[in-house]
């Protein structure tokens, strides 16, 4: 009886350890590597002018500047859920907005290298 109880207890402890290790490994694998900023277009101080460059903005009027890299893989959109457009098209639409406070910008970026993956200008 003692051996059977002992084996059952060892099996339960081993299962608990396996579940603990598996849960931690799963959690670390599911950590988000993409974050985003939602801000008013008037807070963007410098838009990217080339395929490789930066976008510079502030999260609020008195906040420090945030500088994110852009590269050839960065996608530009004119509305949430819209189709990608070229950077030049996004800048053209931005230049036509008379009141920058009426437009929102959503910037998605990779946290590992601070590179923007998507820049969405929503002027609707």
Image (cartoon, grey):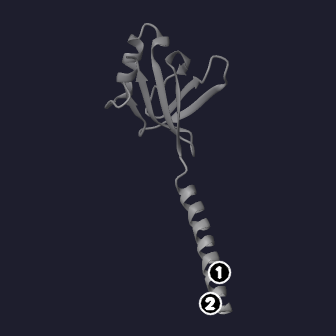
Give the residue at x 38% y 23%.
90
Front-most of residues 33 and 3? 3
Front-most of residues 102 and 27? 27
Give the residue at x 56% y 66%.
22
Q: Position of residue 57 (x, y in %)?
A: 57, 24
In the image, taking residue 80 as reference, residue 10 lies left or right, namely: right
Q: Residue furthest top?
A: 98
**SS type, badge 1:** helix
Residues packed near mark 1 inside 10 Å, few (<14), some (14 to 19) or many (20 plus):
few
Residues packed near mark 2 inside 10 Å, few (<14), some (14 to 19) or many (20 plus):
few
Q: Position of residue 41 (x, y in %)?
A: 49, 18
CA distance separating discs 1 and 2: 9 Å
In the image, taking residue 104 as reference, residue 90 lies left or right, namely: left
Q: Specify the quadrant that holds the N terminus.
A: bottom right
Q: Specify the quadrant that holds the C terminus.
A: top left
Q: Position of residue 112 (x, y in %)?
A: 57, 46
Q: Position of residue 63 (x, y in %)?
A: 66, 22
Asked where in the image residue 16 lies, by quadrant, the reply is bottom right
Residue under numbered circle 2: 4
Front-most of residues 47 and 64? 64
Residue under numbered circle 1: 9
């Amino acid at each position: 009886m003692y051996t059977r109880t002992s084996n059952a207890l060892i099996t339960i402890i081993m299962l608990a350890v396996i579940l603990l290790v598996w849960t931690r490994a799963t959690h670390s694998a599911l950590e988000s590597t993409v974050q985003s900023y939602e801000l008013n277009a008037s807070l963007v101080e410098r838009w990217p002018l080339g395929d490789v460059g930066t976008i510079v903005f502030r999260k609020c009027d008195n906040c420090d500047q945030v500088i994110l890299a852009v590269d050839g893989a960065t996608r530009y959109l004119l509305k949430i859920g819209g189709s990608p457009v070229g950077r030049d098209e996004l800048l053209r639409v931005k230049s036509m907005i008379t009141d920058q406070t009426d437009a929102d910008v959503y910037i998605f970026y990779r946290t590992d290298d601070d590179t923007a993956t998507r820049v969405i200008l929503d002027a609707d």
